[in-house]
Image (spheres, grey):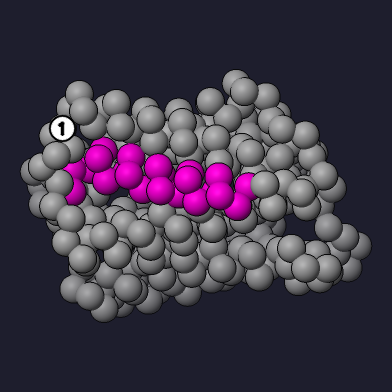
Amino acid sequence: MPPVPTRFVVPFAIGLLCLVWSSTWYGIRICLLEQPPLTSAAVRFLVAGLAMAAVAPRLRAREDAPAPPAWLWLTAGALSFAGSYGILYHAEQFVPSGIAAVLWGIFPLLMAVSGLLFLGERLGLRKLLGMLIAFGGIVTVFGGGLGGIDAGNVHYALVLLLSPVVSAVGTTLIKKFGSGTSSVVLNRNGMLVGSVWLGIAAFVLEDPLAATWSLRGVLALTYLALFGTALTFGIYFWLLRTTPASRLALITYVTPVLAMALGAAVGDGDMDKNAWAGTAAVVFGIGLVVSKGRAANAPAPAR
């Protein structure tokens, strides 16, 4: 990172994550039109892990941190990558991209509870109110009807809810035991471990050789691997070292709205009056959570 004050670097990094991750939901849908879910996820993390391995020596030279313990990156690979994304890819075969992003809106609340119980983070009344308003906005986007999902596919939406739960467990462990360790090593090793687990599951449950690799599908998968995984998780794990996990979890309040707008633009969802009302509530809730008083402008200390 260039020598820019942290108060500028952190908001820029979080904004970049919001933009890229909001587009990955539709990217996954493109891949799933041609590729079996676990196979697609395995290849995504394999490519991303290899990309991280290529740049890791240079990034490690700039990182003044020891390597994380093996158990931590093994756990990160199993939970944050293989487990969470395996569930997500399977469910998003039937759940539209914008709806999937909205369902992931429970992640900030899970991390808020986790931060309070396990990470020593404090949540004032204003932040708690802001998170509840933002989450209420996400619910409003679909009017409580899950965006018109067919009755026969509602259970896939319920299965998808397990993805943020698994991810919250992995993120909590990374934040608690990996804050002082190398985010580059953790990210690289976790992706490669995740790709191995997903690959094993793909050969057991799917036929990876049945995947179709059109130019569109390859471009979508490459984008997901390099930008939606290697770049974004590299930034995200770096931010986890110095930024409260509950604040980073707010990313999932912004990405559902952007993902829904993108889905509507390409015919994978609708933006109705409930969507706009929900968007306003999300923005207002985020403002309550991230706003600070004059005495609280110092960067959050590393934990």
Please give the count of numbered marks on the rendered protein: 1
Quarter where residue 21 is shown: bottom left
Query: Looking at the picture, how far across and down is residue 45, in whole percent?
Result: 41, 44
Query: Looking at the picture, how far across and down is residue 197, in whole percent?
Result: 37, 28
Q: Element under label 1?
A: loop
The dominant secondary structure in magenta is: helix
The residue that appears at 34% across and 74% down in the rendered structure is 261
18 or 273, nearer to the observer: 18
| 248 horizontally vs 151: left or right | right
Neighbor class of circle 1 (other Cα within 10 Å; few <14, some 14-19, many 20+) is some
Q: Is residue 152 visible?
A: yes
Q: Which residue is mark 1?
A: 206
The residue that appears at 48% across and 69% down in the rendered structure is 19
- Residue 43 lies in magenta, yes or no? yes
Classify the position of the C terminus by image quarter.
top right
Query: Looking at the picture, how far across and down is residue 259, in whole percent?
Result: 36, 66
In the image, which residues are magenta?
Answer: 35-56
The residue that appears at 46% across and 31% down in the rendered structure is 193
The residue that appears at 63% across and 47% down in the rendered structure is 56
193 or 125, nearer to the observer: 193
| 144 horizontally vs 155: left or right | right
Quarter where residue 183 is shown: top right
Q: Is residue 82 visible?
A: no
The answer to whether 225 is drawn above or below residue 17 in the figure is: above
Please identify the residue farthest to the right as the structure is shown.
Answer: 295
Quarter where residue 187 is shown: top right
The amino acid at mark 1 is Glu
The answer to whether 237 is drawn above or below residue 232 in the figure is: above
Query: Looking at the picture, how far across and down is residue 274, in whole percent?
Result: 32, 71
| 277 horizontally vs 27: left or right | right
